[in-house]
Image (cartoon, rainbow, N blue to C red):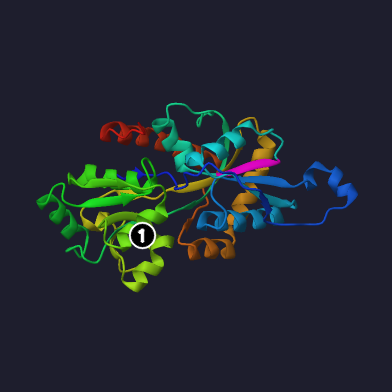
């Protein structure tokens, strides 16, 4: 069975930057301050403070600092679809004191969607390791007369152009996941882009737009309240927090997957021994049960893929996204 890997971009479009907030504060003596191995590592985070991905980044930063024996501080640089954070990582000194948490949007979608990028996603980074995937599921307002994905597909095919779907904007994971479903199913639905996921969710909750893709973490409270109806989850396997929700593959779309990923990386010129040290530390962190439990509690899927697997996935996804964006005629213009 052929697997259609659909990664997707993450959600922020704000261009504001935010101040550094320490994820792990450790006192340092004068002698320790003079030692490069004890200096704080800055972890540039391409997501807004307070969100689920930021919470995940801080949890990883704290545990990474403990393994490295160095304080790790999180520097939030949200905005511009991850381009602000990605450029900061690419331009950082390759001394092992600056790394970044970036997503599929910054590393695979932007190269295909943005006409001008200040960085080269294939050449300007040292890929250290993957951290997590973010499962997406297709949901509907309770008024939609479909109980599952098969029924929805039949409904949309019978009513082309009648139904609409909300997203957090053009080229974000919610949009690209729906475009992949549209391509696989042949359905015709109207795209209603918003300036952020919150506004999109609110209009689906209010019944003004009937459909959307949404991440597991954001959807949890609404699914419990019955204000959103889950139709299918875009992962290879069912999610343990939503065991009753079938996958797209189970619903007639074999190989379909829409799970944005995030990972840790540094500037391209990072010395090989420094990269190996950082990758080993991250592997230890990701192997810890409390780390994996924390990531699962946030609605994510913990990963333990190292540098080679991360670089390979990012390269494959750049190709896959360029193809999807080209075939679907997606443009920011």
Query: Which residue is found at the position 30% from the left and 63% from the top?
Result: 206
**For residue 205, side relative to residue 146 (left or right):** right
Q: Is residue 108 above or below residue 134?
A: above
- Residue 98 on the magenta span: yes
Where does the image place residue 199, in percent across and percent down from the top left? 38, 55
**For residue 180, side relative to residue 91 (left or right):** left
Quadrant containing the C terminus is top left
Where does the image place residue 282, in percent across and percent down from the top left? 61, 50
Q: Is residue 142 or residue 301 the one in the foreground? A: 142
Q: Is residue 187 or residue 14 the one in the foreground? A: 14
Q: Which residues are magenta?
A: 97-101
Q: Which residue is mark 1?
A: 202
Where does the image place residue 283, in percent across and percent down from the top left? 59, 51
Where does the image place residue 33, in percent across and percent down from the top left? 84, 46
Q: Main secondary structure of the magenta part?
A: strand
**For residue 133, side relative to residue 58 (left or right):** left
Q: Is residue 226 or residue 325 the one in the foreground? A: 226
**For residue 315, side relative to residue 324 (left or right):** right
Query: Which residue is found at the position 36% from the left and 58% from the top?
Result: 201
């Amino acid at each position: 069975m052929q697997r259609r890997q659909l990664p997707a971009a993450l959600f922020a479009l704000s261009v504001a930057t935010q101040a550094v907030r320490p994820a792990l504060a450790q006192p340092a003596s004068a002698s320790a301050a003079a030692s490069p191995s004890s200096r704080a590592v800055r972890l540039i985070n391409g997501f807004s403070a307070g969100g689920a991905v930021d919470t995940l980044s801080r949890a990883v930063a704290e545990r990474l600092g403990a393994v490295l024996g160095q304080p790790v501080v999180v520097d939030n640089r949200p905005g511009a679809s991850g381009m602000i954070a990605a450029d900061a990582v690419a331009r950082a000194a390759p001394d092992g004191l600056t790394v970044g948490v970036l997503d599929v949007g910054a590393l695979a979608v932007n190269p295909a969607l943005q006409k001008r990028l200040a960085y080269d996603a294939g050449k300007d980074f040292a890929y250290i390791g993957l951290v997590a995937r973010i499962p997406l599921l297709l949901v509907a307002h309770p008024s939609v007369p479909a109980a599952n994905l098969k029924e929805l597909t039949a409904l949309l095919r019978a009513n082309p152009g009648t139904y609409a779907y909300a997203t957090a904007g053009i080229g974000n994971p919610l949009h690209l996941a729906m475009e992949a479903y549209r391509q696989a199913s042949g359905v015709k639905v109207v795209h209603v882009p918003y300036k952020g996921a919150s506004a999109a969710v609110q209009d689906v909750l209010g019944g003004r737009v009937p459909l959307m893709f949404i991440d597991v973490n954001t959807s949890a409270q609404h699914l419990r309240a019955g204000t959103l109806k889950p139709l299918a989850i875009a992962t290879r396997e069912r999610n343990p927090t939503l065991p009753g929700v079938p996958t797209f593959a189970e619903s007639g779309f074999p190989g379909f997957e829409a799970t944005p990923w995030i990972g840790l990386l540094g500037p391209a010129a990072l010395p090989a021994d420094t990269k190996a040290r950082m990758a080993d530390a991250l592997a230890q962190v990701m192997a810890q049960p409390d780390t994996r439990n924390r990531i699962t509690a946030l609605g994510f899927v913990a990963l333990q893929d190292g540098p080679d697997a991360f670089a390979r996935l990012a390269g494959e996804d750049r190709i896959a996204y360029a193809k999807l964006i080209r075939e679907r005629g997606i443009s920011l213009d």
